[in-house]
Every structure is written in structure tokens, then in C-alpha cells.
Amino acid sequence: MATPGVYGVPCSAPLSRKPRLFVKGQLNVIASRWLSSRWFLRRIEANEQSPYPMKQSPIFVKHYDLMAWLIPHTLKFPKSQRGVLARQIQTELFRIQEALVNAGTSGTPSPDLLEADRSLLRLRTYLRLSRDLKLLSSAQFAHVSRLAGEVGKLLGGWKKSLV
């Protein structure tokens, strides 16, 4: 039986029930509907390119992996350090990402690569500090250092290829 809703329009849910914003798995349903939408399929079929052509490099994938691993771990920092050290780590991650994208889309990537290198150096310092403050375990620090090292090697190779 339908109950009266807003402006007398019948509504199937009772008035006392609050709507939930996200139901478990709802985002997956929304994503699968979007992926199967005609717009997305037409875009794939037309093989549309981005208006900003970017050089394909594994550095983007490696840095994304670093971000995907590190951001959730910084959210687990104690509240006293979440606003200080965690924010600085996340800021440096996004600075590196911006510099890499700018370097990939510009004609002269050298200044952007230098900025990414400086940000990576600051990030390594913040990670070392977070290990010393016992915010990251030794195993976590070893893993994130390995990821940052891979990004650094790829960044150095990109810089050398321009010289």
C-alpha cells in the first residue's frame, strides 16, 4: 500500500524510514551501469584520444600504486599526527602526481621532472620521520620505500633520457 509522499504524491516507502545514501555494493552497481552505458561504449569504439596527449610510461602506474598504498595508511595515523605529518605526506604525493602529469603533457618536461624529484625527496624524508615516530612499522616502511625507490628510478631514467 502506498503512503502519501511529498505534495500528496504516493510513495512506496513508509515516511518513518530514512533513505540510505549508499547501500553496500551500490557503488559497484553504479560503476557497472556507467561502464555499460552507450556513451562509454561509443567512446571506446570511436577510440577517442585525450586532448592532452601524454607519453605512456610505467612511472604513472608505479606512482599510482604508491598513492593507493600510502594514503589509506596515513589515514590510520594517530589524530595528533593526521593533521601534520599525514597531510604533508599526502600533499607531496599529489605534488608528484601533478608534476608527472605536467611533464607528460608539456613540450619541455625538465622543470616539472625536477619538481617531482624534489617532492619525492621530501616524501622520503617524511616517510623516514614517520618510521622513527613509530607511525609506520619496519615492514611497512620497507614496502613503501621499495615503491618510492621504483618511482625514483623511473623518474631518474626519464630525466636522463632528456639530456
Image: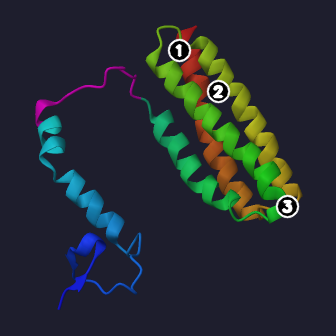
Residue at numbered disc 3? 80
Residue projecting furthest to the front? 7
**Sequence-wise, which precedes: disc 2 or disc 1?**
2
Residue at the (75%, 33%) spot, across then down? 121
Q: Position of residue 143 (x, y in %)?
A: 65, 56
> 39 or 86: nearer the eye?
39
Q: Cα distance, mark 3 to mark 2?
A: 28 Å
Magenta part of the protein: which range?
45-56
Q: Cα distance, mark 2 to mark 1?
A: 16 Å
The answer to whether marks 2 and 1 mark residues whose Cβ atoms lie closer than 8 Å is: no
Q: Position of residue 71 (x, y in %)?
A: 62, 54
- Quadrant including the C terminus: top right
Q: Amino acid at mark 1?
A: Ser
Q: Cα distance, mark 3 to mark 1?
A: 43 Å
> 104 or 3: nearer the eye?
3
Q: Secondary structure at mark 2?
A: helix
Residue at numbered disc 1? 161
Q: Position of residue 58 (x, y in %)?
A: 45, 35
Residue 22 got which mark? none
| Residue 152 appears in the rendering | no
Point out the frontmost of discs 3 and 1: 3
Residue at numbered disc 2? 116
**Sequence-wise, which precedes: disc 3 or disc 2?**
3
Q: Position of residue 135 (x, y in %)?
A: 80, 62
Tell whether 29 sits left or right of 160.
Answer: left
| Residue 88 appears in the rendering | yes
Tell whether 80 sits left or right of 110.
Answer: right
